[in-house]
Amino acid sequence: MKAFTLIEVIVLIAVTGLLGLTINTLIVNFYRSNAYLIQETSAIDSAHRGLRVSFEDLREASYGDDGSYPIKSAATSTITFFSDVDNDGSVERIRLYLTNGTLYRGVTDSISAPPSYTGQPEATTTIATYVRNSSTTPLFRYYDSDGSELSTTTAIDISQIASVSTTVLVDINPFRAPDILTLTETATLRNLR
């Protein structure tokens, strides 16, 4: 059995160190050059998952625990509705709203005897960041049972809403390619038919 000489050990350590440094440099350069793409992909994925969950809840909108109509309010950048989001038999009030380029979801539980949402804390989560919707591209659009879009220039008659669609424009840096990415989702309110 032959052992390594001191020179062979030094060469092995040098080669291993050089290989480790090269791999580290490649990884750092990859993340530097692709950081924007990774950040944009993460923002899109987060927005897509948040919208999907929120619109699944919207499809199941039902009367609130306090007897409120399934849709409490509707506007171009906000909607408030009632749905049992955690399947606990209690209906929560859900508010989707856009503030300063961020789309939020607020959930409020009711208290019992008699059921009420007033004064209860709202648990807020972020659905999407870097939202670039403007007045020409409203976040929410509302349709009646015939599929005709309800006008948002006046107060929306919530009793006429049969379906809701959203278009979310996401762009983490408007001055850099790729262009704005568009996410859409539609929900037909099942419990209002």
Image (cartoon, grey):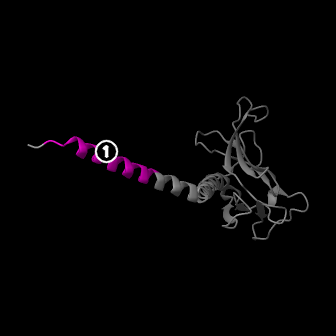
Which residue appears at 78% of the width and 60% of the height? 133
Image coordinates of residue 62 in percent, x first then y, are 69, 49
Name, please, the residue furthest toward the left: 1
Q: Is residue 45 above or below residue 92?
A: below
Q: Which quarter of the picture shows residue 123?
A: top right
165 horizontally vs 39: left or right = right
In the foreground, 125 or 81: 125
Which span is picked out in magenta? 3-24
The residue shown at (42%, 49%) is 21
Q: Label the magenta part by its dominant secondary structure.
A: helix
What's the residue type where badge 1 is placed? Ile
Location of mark 1 (residue): 13
Q: Residue at x 57, y 59 (%)?
A: 33
Q: Nearer the viewer, residue 152 or 37?
A: 37
On the image, which quarter does residue 7 sit in?
A: top left
Is disc 1 placed on a helix, strand or loop? helix
Residue 12 in the figure: left or right of residue 115: left
Specify whether residue 13 is painted magenta.
Answer: yes
Magenta includes 34? no
Task: Looking at the picture, tell me which residue is in the foreground, 160 or 138.
Answer: 138
